[in-house]
Image: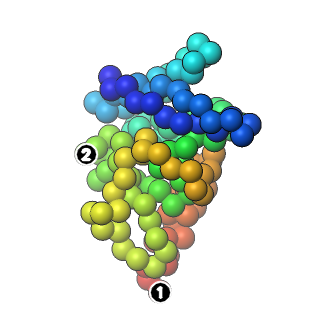
Amino acid sequence: MKAIEVSLNIGGVVETAKIECDRKRPSLVFMMKDGLKKQYSASDLFICLGMLRADFPHIKFLCKGAKLNVYPSRMCSQMAGGIVAYELQMGRTSELEDIVNIFDFENTDITDKIEKQREFYERWIDSLGQ
């Protein structure tokens, strides 16, 4: 498993936690400094991160995978295990330079709900036909 440090905003205080992830068997282990430890498994790491965020709505995960306009393509999900996704812009097709690591730092347009990201993705698809 690969260990990654992620930044969190908890009640206005920024701290870090550790995430160990396994792309081959899409799973992650979330570990906070206070000893809290929780494991998630799903079809890809993006969904695992979404499950983690849903369990801790009071925590703002400061990473690309929690940004409203970030969502994986099927290819990102299948070939990279969901560790990468596209940072989407309305009305513009995605390019290679739009690929981001879901655990990279981000602090703007953060959401705690993967459903909101899915809704943005669907609106983005609709925006391409206009």
Amino acid carrying mark 1 in the image: Gln
Spatial distance from mark 2 to mark 1, Cα to Cα?
Answer: 30 Å
* Place of residue 109 in the rendered image (x, y in percent of width and height, measured from the top left): 60, 57
* As drawn, 99 above or below 33: below
Q: Which residue is mark 2?
A: 79
Mark 2 surroundings within 10 Å by alpha-carbon count, few (fewer than 14), some (14 through 19), many (20 or more): some
Kindly give the residue lying farthest to the top in the view shown.
35
Residue 125 located left or right of residue 3: right
* Place of residue 37 in the rendered image (x, y in percent of width and height, measured from the top left): 55, 17
* Place of residue 19 in the rendered image (x, y in percent of width and height, measured from the top left): 45, 27
* Place of residue 9 in the rendered image (x, y in percent of width and height, measured from the top left): 64, 38
Residue 117 located left or right of residue 45: right
Is residue 115 visible in the rendered structure shown here?
Answer: no
Amino acid carrying mark 2 in the image: Met
Q: Quadrant of the N terminus?
A: top left
* As drawn, 103 above or below 90: above
Residue at x-position 49% and y-position 74%? 90
Q: Which mark is residue 130?
A: 1
Using the image as rendered, state which of residue 87 and residue 25 is in the foreground: 87
SS state under label 2: helix
Using the image as rendered, state which of residue 49 and residue 101 is in the foreground: 101
| Residue 38 quadrant | top right
| Residue 54 quadrant | top right
Residue at x-position 31% and y-position 33%? 23
Q: Which mark is residue 22?
A: none
Count how many numbered circles sit on residues in the image.
Answer: 2
The colouring scheme, among rainbow, by chain, secondary structure or one colour, is: rainbow
